[in-house]
Image (spheres, helix red, strand yellow):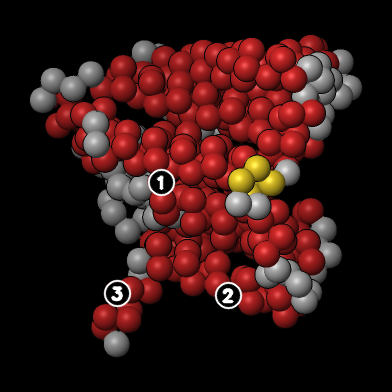
Amino acid sequence: MNRIKTLLAEPLVLASIAILVLLAAGELLSPGFARGDQITRLLTVAAILGIAAAGQSLVVIGGREGIDLSVGALISLGALTAGNVMSGSNGAILPAVLAAGGVTFAIGIVNGLGVTALRIPPLVMTLGMMGVIQGGLVVLSRGAPSGNAAPMLMSFVNQPLLLGLPGILFVWALIAVAMWFLLRRTSFGYAVYAMGSNERAAALTGMPTSLLRTLLYGLSGLFAGLTGVCVIGYTGNSFISVGDQYVLPSIIAVVIGGVSLAGGAGNYFGVMLGAIALTLLQSVLTTLQLEFWGRQIIFGAVLLGLMLLYGRQKQLRV
């Protein structure tokens, strides 16, 4: 029994169980929910959330109660930038990706400088940046949908590319490998975990903690911009609030995946499971025809429940 309790206390085990339970519940409520093509569609949606959560997880692992509330606005900005650069042209896909990633990476760096150089709390800095970006998007787009995805990008995101799977799933797999290598096989990754566990001790050993933290916010912005490209590839066009729906889910996916909000612990594989579980939950709630506000209440309750269960197991680092 003790071993079972220990296993059930592991976030990865809980996330895996949640995925199986939600699949069973979805199939019970709507026969065909767990069909192969339906699972592929759900994984496509989970991949978009998972890419956004990749940047969020880096910021959280870095410690100092790091969080990036500007992710949603940056996704909207990335989608708007990519859509306007592409304007439906296949030949402009690469410039669109570079433009979207470059702009959002730069804004992420500004977030990082605000947190490190100006000592603004991450919650306040990223919340303020979210407001600035949202206001700028209204001015740029005049409140109307702006930009169109290239047909090749839409096909890459939505249509089978290899083995019956869309291209975005292979991109997500590559990101997973890159995240594993970055965090587990590089000095940068070791430094991020050390900083997240105890920033003061890391600084005393000579680690450039301010530079590291600034880069983490820059990477969070970069992943948000790439998510924006995927979003416009999935939907075909963009509007100013298209990324708002990813803010809370990106945080919940990180917590479900076992990343400690105190920093210094967690891995991206767990975050991927969290993104899949959360996407399944959203799909089940949609099957139940629950209104958007009801889904938001449940998402918030899930986050609070996870925090009570294991999100605050470790004391806050200094």
Q: Quadrant of residue 101?
A: top right
Going by the image, does 261 lie left or right of 225?
left
Label 3 crowd bin: few (<14), some (14–19), many (20+), radius 10 Å: few
Q: Say which of 63 and 229 sits in front.
A: 229
Q: Say which of 29 and 129 sits in front.
A: 29
Q: Quadrant of residue 247?
A: top right
* Residue at disc 3, secondary structure: helix
The kind of residue tagged 1 is: Tyr
Q: Which residue is mark 2?
A: 21
Q: Nearer the viewer, mark 1 or mark 3?
A: 1
Q: Position of residue 199 (x, y in %)?
A: 23, 31
Classify the position of the C terminus by image quarter.
Answer: top left
Q: Is residue 221 above or below residue 295?
A: above
The kind of residue tagged 3 is: Thr
Dot label at residue 268? 1
Q: Which of marks 3 and 1 precedes in the sequence?
A: 3
Dot label at residue 6? 3
Q: Say which of 44 and 298 sits in front.
A: 44
Gap between marks 2 and 1 measured at Cα: 22 Å
Gap between marks 2 and 3 measured at Cα: 20 Å
Q: Which of marks 1 and 2 precedes in the sequence?
A: 2
Q: Position of residue 77 (x, y in %)?
A: 68, 21
Label 2 crowd bin: few (<14), some (14–19), many (20+), radius 10 Å: some
Residue at the outermost bottom position: 1
Label 1 crowd bin: few (<14), some (14–19), many (20+), radius 10 Å: many
Q: Is residue 44 above or below residue 289?
A: above
